[in-house]
Image: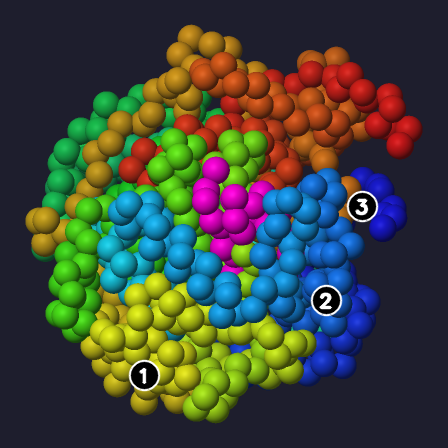
Amino acid sequence: MKFKRKIQPYRAAAGGWGSLEATTRFVLDSKAALKNMRNLLRMNKARGFDCPGCAWGDDNKSTFSFCENGAKAVTWEATRRIVDNAFFAQHSVSKLYQQSDYFLEYQGRLTQPMRYNSETDHYEPVTWDDAFALIAEHIQAMDNPDQMELYTSGRASNEASWLYQLFGRMHGSNNFPDCSNMCHEASGSGLKRSIGVGKGTIRLDDFDHAEAIFVFGQNPGTNHPRMLHSLRHAADHGARIVTFNTLRERGLERFADPQKPLEVVTSMAGTISSAYYQPNLGGDMAAIRGMVKALLEAHRALVSQQQPGLFDEAFLAANTQGVNDYFTAVDNTGWAQIVQQSGLSEQQIREAAEIYRSAKRVICTWAMGITQHKHSVDSVREIVNLQLLFGQLGKKGAGLCPVRGHSNVQGNRTMGIDEKPSAAFLDALGKHFNFEPPRAAGHNTVEALEAMLRDEIKVLIALGGNLAAAAPDSPRTEEAMSRCGLTVHISTKLNRSHLVPGRDSLILPTLGRTERDEQANGNQFITVEDSFSMVHASEGVGIPLSPLQRSETAIVAGIAHAVLGSEKVDWLAMAGDYSLIRDHIAATIPGFQDFNLRCDIPGGFYLGNAAADLRFNTPSGKAEFSAAALPDSLFPQLEGQQVPFTLQTLRSHDQYNTTIYGLDDRYRGVYGQREVVFINPEDLQALGMTEGQLVDIETLWNDGITRRVSGFKLVPYNIPRGNLAAYYPETNPLVPLSSYGDGSGTPTSKSVPVSLSPSEDAVSLRIA
Ligand SMILES: Nc1nc2c(c(=O)[nH]1)N[C@H]1C(S)=C(S)[C@@H](COP(=O)(O)OP(=O)(O)OC[C@H]3O[C@@H](n4cnc5c(=O)[nH]c(N)nc54)[C@H](O)[C@@H]3O)O[C@H]1N2
Ligand SMILES: Nc1nc2c(c(=O)[nH]1)N[C@H]1C(S)=C(S)[C@@H](COP(=O)(O)OP(=O)(O)OC[C@H]3O[C@@H](n4cnc5c(=O)[nH]c(N)nc54)[C@H](O)[C@@H]3O)O[C@H]1N2
Ligand SMILES: [Mo]
C-alpha cells in the first residue's frame, strides 16, 4: 500500500464537503458499495442497526442521519475480504506480527475458528466444539476461579455482556477488566462519589434548551460527529459554546452541516465555539478551580452588600453536602498555582467564569482530555462542584454529560461488566439463579495485566477489542498476554492481540452488529444503551460472510455450556432466543421491567437517572462536594526531575481506536502518515529543531525501563508550549503500566512525561 504523504493545514469547516467526499470515497473504495449504502440508510432508525461508531444519542427526527466516521465503521465491517484458513496457512504469526495495525485489519473479516500451533507458528482451523472443549479443559485445570480474566470491549451487546458476566460470576470471579477501565472510568467513579450515579444526567434534547455548553477535553468533530449537530443547533439558538482543549480542533471552531447542502456549497458554515481556551494538559481542574474562585469572590461581594448571592443557596441547602469545605479548598488555592497549572491567564479564567454565570442553564460535557490523567477523578468532581453551585442538576437544558466512547460501553456496565459490582447487583443475581456470587473485587485492566506478568493468570478471554494494542506499555502488555496458558479472542477482524498468543490460543470469528443474526428461534435483535441512558434495539441486515461465524451471544453461551454445563442455567436455550436473556435481565437489573415489550418503542426507552431527579445515592443522601486540593504535580514520581514535555496520545480522523481506516487526519492537515508529533513552533525553535525533522520520543519514568519510539516527524501546531500530541496506538509503548489515575486505575494516556531527541536513523528514514 502506497500513501501520499503531506502536511497541509485544513482551512474549511469540519463536516462539509470534505466529510461527504471522504465518506463516499471510502464506501466506494470497498468492494461492497451497494450493500454499504443500504446499510448506511438503516443506521439509527427504529429498527435496523445501531451505529457501531460512537455512543452519541439519536434524535429520530432526521431521515438520513449518519456521519462520515459512522459510515467508515459500517463499511469497515461490511468488507467482502476474508481472513480464513488459507490466509493463516500462508502467513506465520511471527511474519504477521511485523505488519502494521492498518495492514492487519485491512485483510478482512475472520470467518472460521482458528487455534494457534506453536510448533508451526501458524493458526490452524479448529471446530467450534473442539474450541469450546479446549477452553473448558484449560479452565477446569485452574486452581481457583480468579486465574481467569474476562476482558470486554464496549461494542458487545447488552445480551452478550450480561450472559458473559453471569458465566464469569457463576464460575466464581469478578475479574472483568474492560475498555472502560482505560476510558471513562474516572467519570464513573467521580460521578458516583459526587452524585451517586456513574452516568451522565442529561438527555439529548437538553442541548436544545441549554444557554451555555462547556466542552472539556473532547474532539467531537472526529470522535462524536453527530454531537456537532447538537452543538451547532444550540449555537444557532444563541447558546454559548465554550471549549477547553489543549489543541485547536477544527470541528470545534467551524462546522458545516453535511445534511444541509446549501451550507456545504456556499460557505455558510457556522462558528461553533464562542470562546476557546487552550489549557495545559491536565490543567482543567485548575482552570475550573479558578473559575469558582472568581465566582466566589463575586458571590461574597454581593452577599456583603446584603444582595442575593450568585450561587443557588436553596439548591445547595436542600441537595448538597460539603460546600463550606469546598470553599475553604478554593480559598486555599492561589491564583499563581491556578495560572501556572492551567496555563491560562487569570483574565481568561475570569472571562470563562463570566460566560458561565451569565447562563441560566449550563451543560458540561467531557471525554478523554479529562479522564486520562492522574487526577482525573478529582477533575471530574471539580466539574460537578461547579455545576452544583448553580443548581445545574434536575432542570431542563442543564447537567453533566460524559460523552462515552464505544457504542455500548455504558450498556456493558449497566449489565454488570464491572470488576467492582455493587452488593445489591450481586444479591439480585444470586437470588435469581440460586447461587453465591463472588464478593471480592476483581481486576481492572491494569491489574489484570500486572497479574499476568506475575504468572497468576491461566486464561484470558476477550469479548471483542484489541487489548494488546489498546493497553499501555506495549512490550509489557504483550509479554503479559503471552504468559497466559490460553488466550481466546472473540473478534471480527485480525488484530495485534491475536499475534501475541498464550501457550494456547484461539481466534473465534464473530458476527458484527450490522449483520443478520439467525438463531434456533429465528432472527434475533440485540439492545444497546447510549450516552443518554436510552436503551434501544438493533437488528443487523447484512448477510454473514460465512456460516461458521457465530454471534457473540452464541459464543459466550457455548463457552459457558462447555465449562459449567446446563443444569443450573440453560445457556444454549438463551443463545437460541435472546428474549429469554432479556427476561433474566429484567429480573436482575433495575430499570428493565417489561424489557422485551419495551424493545418495540421507536427510539428506545429511558433508563432514568436518580441524580437528574435530585435523588442522590451517596453516603449522605445528598450530592457531595469534593474538596480535593489541586495536584502538586502531574508526575509526583519524578519529584525534582526536569520534565521537558507532556505528551498526550490521541486519535486521528481515520481511526477507530486501534483500528486504522486510513493514514489521513484531515482536520489537522496530516496526510498519508501517522508517525507525527505536534509541537508548539516556539518549542521547535528553542530545541533548535526544524519542521519535518524526525525525532525519538522517550518517556521519563522511575523504574529504570527505557520507553522510546523513533522516527516521529515534528509538525508545528497550535498547542501551548511544553505540550505535545501524537497518535495512539503508535505511542502506547510510551505509557508506563504503573502510571494510572488515582481512584480510577486509568492509564495516564493524556499526560506522559517525555523528552525529544533527533532520531539517529533520521536520514535513512527520510529518504525512505
Ligand atoms: N471516529 C472515531 N470515533 C470514536 C473513537 C475513535 O477512535 N474514532 N473512539 C471512541 C472512544 S472509545 C472514545 S473514548 C471517544 C474518545 O473521544 P475523545 O476524547 O474526543 O478522543 P481523543 O482523540 O482521545 O481526544 C482527546 C481530545 O481532548 C483534548 N485534550 C487532551 N488532553 C487534554 C487536557 O488535559 N485538557 C483539555 N482541555 N483537552 C485535552 C485533545 O486535544 C483532543 O481534542 O471517541 C469514540 N468515538
Ligand atoms: N495511548 C492511549 N491508549 C488508549 C487510549 C488513548 O486515548 N491513548 N484510549 C483508550 C480507550 S478510550 C479505549 S475505549 C480503549 C479501546 O480498547 P479496545 O476496545 O480493546 O480496542 P478497539 O480498538 O476498539 O478494538 C478493536 C477490535 O475489536 C474487534 N471488534 C470490532 N467490532 C467488533 C464486534 O462487533 N464484536 C467483537 N467481538 N469484536 C469486534 C475487532 O477485532 C477489532 O480489531 O483503548 C484505550 N487505549
Ligand atoms: Mo473509549
Q: State which quarter of the image contains the C terminus.
A: top right
Give residue 40's mark: none
Q: Is residue 499 magenta?
A: yes
Give the Cα distance between marks 2 and 3: 25 Å
Place of residue 60 in the rendered image (x, y in percent of width and height, measured from the top left):
49, 81
Identify the secondary structure beneath mark 1: helix
Q: Position of residue 563 (x, y in %)?
A: 35, 63
For residue 593, side relative to residue 103 (left or right): left
Is the CB atom of the residue marked by disc 2 within 8 angstroms of ligand 2's nearest atom? no
Residue positioned 72% across, 34% down in the render: 676
Residue 593 position (above or below residue 27): below
| Quarter of the image where one finds residue 12 | bottom right
Instruction: Characterize the local packing of mark 1: few (<14), some (14-19) or many (20 or more) Cα atoms within 10 angstroms.
Output: some
The residue where tag 2 is placed is: 82
Q: Which residue lies furthest to the front in this view?
A: 119
Residue 678 x %, y %? 67, 32
Q: Distance between the residues labelled 3 and 1?
A: 48 Å
What's the residue at 48%, 91% (across, down)? 522
The residue to which callout 1 is attached is 580
Q: Can residue 364 be seen in this view?
A: no
Q: Is residue 3 left or right of 679 when viewed as pictured?
A: right
Task: Report the amino acid beneath label 2.
Answer: Ile
Residue 303: % across, % down? 16, 40
The residue that disc 3 covers is 672
Q: Residue at x 60, y 29 (%)?
A: 724
